[in-house]
Amino acid sequence: MTYEVGDFMQTPASFGYERATSVDHAIALLEQLGSEARLVAGGHSLLPMMKLRLARPEHLIDINDLVGDLSFIRVEGDELRIGAMTRHAELLASAVAGEHFRIFHDAERVIADPIVRNRGTIGGSLCQADPSEDLSAVFAALRAEIVIQSASGSRSVSARDFHVGPYETAVGDAEMLTEIRVPLRPNLGSAYRKVERRAGDWAVAAAGACVSLDGDTIADVGIGLTAVGAAHFCAPEAEDSLRGQAATDEAIDAAGALAAEHSNPGTDQRGPADYKRHLAGELTKRALRSAIARARGEEG
Ligand SMILES: Cc1cc2nc3c(=O)[nH]c(=O)nc-3n(C[C@H](O)[C@H](O)[C@H](O)COP(=O)(O)OP(=O)(O)OC[C@H]3O[C@@H](n4cnc5c(N)ncnc54)[C@H](O)[C@@H]3O)c2cc1C
């Protein structure tokens, strides 16, 4: 058998290229170019998929000139707001994000590598909707709201309803994600724990927890899971078991068991399903312990 040099090259199919100058312009281009057009932000997910011909958009609409409008991390009223074009590295470096939600720094430290984090965006990560995506679990734990804009205005979708399936989101044709809003709450601690095969890899399994304490009682709790087939990236049965309970080791262990029981991992190159289910429980417990310690003002 003979091979040509081209047999081994990964090149995308041809496509048209537009550069949006504003959010309204990007949406107008999406409307004008139709359903075969795709936004490109950091390009770290879309471009590899195009090279492998797993995605063949006819047009790319580059939104990197929108950083002035869509790259921000700030507190407004009782919310932390994060713009869609904020890069992973900016979230990792953000003092205001870390001050309110340590979970962001926990997670960003273990997402990919500095090259991907310097370019990849928060909006692009959520819109890629990979079933192993870390921030999907983080925003599910935080019960964030995701703002989607179209020509007719903006609407807000709960992070838990944003993913409608693997690689599918609530973002419709001629719509784009513009920002994520996270409610601020008193006496809150949050944490993220991940097992990966090697530094910078996708999760074998990971869990995030966000706990509000009233004295030593768990007033509210959010638990996010990724890579373990948890519906909507969350663990509602484990959350229900904790709400209103004293923050004890027994309660945490019971919640971990429920998280494991209700996850639905598959066997793949990252490990067997039983191992991932075990990790779902163990990482949920570790994230909860750390979040509770942080809510108490201890080092978690
Ligand atoms: C080597 C490597 C390792 C990685 N490791 C991890 C990891 O450990 N954990 C993890 O969670 N992720 C990981 N990733 C994924 C990485 O974090 C994401 O690929 C990347 O950040 C996606 O963001 P992006 O800006 O590059 O999106 P793009 O590739 O530009 O876009 C992705 C998708 O989102 C759409 N999109 C982008 N922005 C918007 C918007 N504002 N509104 C609507 N649609 C939009 C695009 O049309 C496209 O369909 C890894 C990626 C690589 C290449």
Image (tube, rainbow, N blue to C red):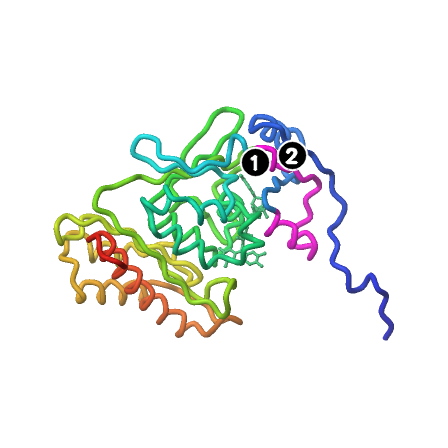
Residue 232 visible in image:
no
Q: Secondary structure at mark 2?
A: loop
Residue type indicated by callout 2: Gly
Q: For residue 40, which quarter of the picture? A: top right
Q: Residues within 10 Å of mark 1 (few under 14, many from 20)?
A: some
The total of numbered circles placed on residues is: 2
Q: Residues within 10 Å of mark 2 (few under 14, many from 20)?
A: some
Label 2: which residue? Answer: 34
Residue 91 visible in image:
yes
Query: Answer yes or no: do the residues labelled 2 and 1 have beta carbons within 8 Å?
Result: yes
Q: For residue 64, which quarter of the picture? A: top right
Nearer to us in this view, 166 or 143: 143
Q: Is residue 128 left or right of residue 139?
A: right
Q: Position of residue 277 (x, y in %)?
A: 37, 69
Q: Position of residue 107 (x, y in %)?
A: 41, 55
Identify the residue at horizontal 42%, vertical 61% (top origin).
229
Identify the residue at horizontal 31%, vertical 55% (top origin).
209
CA gap, disc 2 to disc 1?
8 Å
Identify the residue at horizontal 53%, vertical 45% (top origin).
121
Nearer to us in this view, 267 or 215: 215
The magenta stretch is: 43-66
| Quarter of the figure with the C terminus | bottom left
Q: Is residue 59 magenta?
A: yes
